[in-house]
């Protein structure tokens, strides 16, 4: 058997950053952003870093800096109160600066998404003078509820279903990320969209599943495929990079963009 094309790393910073991961954990745990349970969130954050490392995702230095920040905040909150300051003001909340950064990042990210939708819509509507305009559905508009960490959660669910005895099975020869990328594109040649889970059907080896996942991330980074949810908490769908929308949908995108300005 020839050597498998590993290690293969997808640059994580291309997709999400440490603040995105924190916002994902806050949303997933349904906690108040103004009252973050720092011990729980810090532990889950570290667990995610461990999972991403096991998936061979290249973790940027900013993730490690944030991990250290969370541990520091957790330590400060666990320190016993000074007996001499019982009757005085407890001082600033150690989480205050983190909350401020999260709120500011969330606000700018939402504004950037609206502006990007508007710019893309204008480009498609007015770039061609001779040909009729073709409006293209925005990947970011569709991807707003699906983050890299949602995909990692879904992948973990897939891996959890593999019986332990399956982990030692012989894997296919010449298994590479490029092979899996081509396989995914071939599937999308005949279908407008497929579910994220369907791309892993019939795969019962951990390494094959991980390589398929890396291939999907690489296709997304190269803007060859897009992932979105048709409805809240609905299945994650995968489609080619561009899919047509109606004029009514285009008007909704334009209206949303104007409201955000």
Image: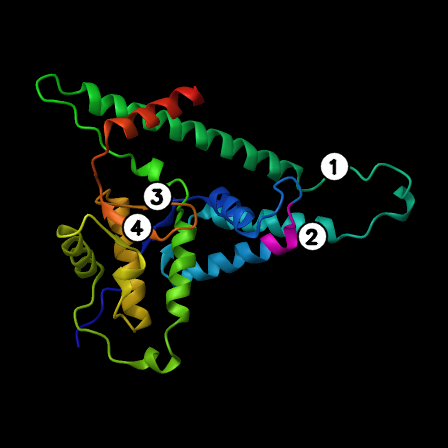
Look at mark 4 in the image and give the residue it sits on: 237
Could you tell me which secondary element the residue under label 2 belongs to? helix
Please tell me which residue is depicted at 59% across the width and 52% down the height of the picture. Answer: 41
Q: CA distance from mark 4 to mark 3?
A: 20 Å
Q: Nearer the viewer, residue 174 or 124?
A: 124
Q: Which residue is mark 3?
A: 14
The reply to whether dot 2 and dot 3 touch (C-beta < 8 Å) is no
Separation of marks 2 and 3 at Cα, in angstroms:
31 Å
Of tags 4 and 2, which is closer to the observer?
4
| Residue 114: image location, x then y, percent | 39, 27
3D distance between C-alphas at marks 1 and 3? 35 Å
* Residue 206 x %, y %: 33, 71
Q: Residues at badges 1 and 3 in contact (C-beta under 8 Å)?
A: no
For marks 1 and 3, the one nearer the N-term is: 3
Quadrant of res 55: bottom left
Q: Earlier in the sequence, mark 4 or mark 2?
A: 2
Residue 47 lies, with reference to residue 100, above or below; the image says: below
Residue at label 1? 92
- Numbered badge on residue 235: none
Pick whichever of labels 2 and 1 is earlier in the sequence: 2
Does 14 sit above or below residue 80?
above
Q: Earlier in the sequence, mark 2 or mark 3?
A: 3
State the separation of the CA atoms marked 4 and 1. Answer: 44 Å
Q: Is residue 248 magenta?
A: no
Q: Residues within 10 Å of mark 1 (few under 14, many from 20)?
A: few
Residue topped by disc 2: 75
The quarter of the picture where the N terminus appears is bottom left
Query: Where does the magenta region start and end?
Result: 36-41
On screen, residue 82 versus residue 167, left or right, reads right
Q: Earlier in the sequence, mark 4 or mark 3?
A: 3
């Amino acid at each position: 058997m020839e050597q498998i094309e590993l290690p293969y790393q997808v640059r994580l910073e291309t997709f999400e950053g440490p603040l995105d991961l924190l916002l994902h954990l806050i949303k997933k745990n349904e906690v108040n952003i103004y009252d973050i349970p720092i011990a729980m969130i810090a532990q889950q954050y570290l667990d995610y870093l461990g999972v991403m490392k096991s998936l061979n995702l290249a973790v940027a230095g900013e993730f490690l800096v944030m991990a250290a920040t969370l541990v520091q905040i957790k330590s400060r909150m666990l320190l016993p109160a000074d007996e001499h300051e019982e009757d005085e003001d407890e001082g600033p909340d150690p989480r205050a600066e983190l909350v401020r950064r999260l709120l500011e990042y969330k606000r700018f990210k939402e504004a950037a998404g609206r502006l990007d939708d508007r710019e893309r819509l204008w480009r498609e509507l007015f770039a061609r003078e001779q040909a009729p305009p073709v409006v293209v559905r925005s990947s970011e508009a569709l991807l707003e509820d699906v983050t890299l960490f949602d995909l990692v959660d879904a992948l973990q669910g897939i891996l959890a279903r593999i019986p332990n005895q399956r982990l030692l099975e012989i894997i296919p020869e010449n298994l590479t990320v490029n092979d899996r990328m081509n396989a995914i594109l071939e599937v999308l040649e005949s279908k407008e969209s497929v579910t994220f889970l369907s791309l892993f059907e019939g795969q019962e080896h951990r390494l094959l599943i991980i390589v398929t996942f890396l291939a999907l991330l690489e296709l997304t980074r190269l803007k060859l495929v897009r992932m979105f949810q048709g409805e809240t908490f609905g299945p994650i769908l995968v489609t080619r990079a561009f899919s047509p929308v109606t004029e009514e949908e285009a008007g909704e995108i334009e209206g949303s963009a104007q409201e955000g300005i």
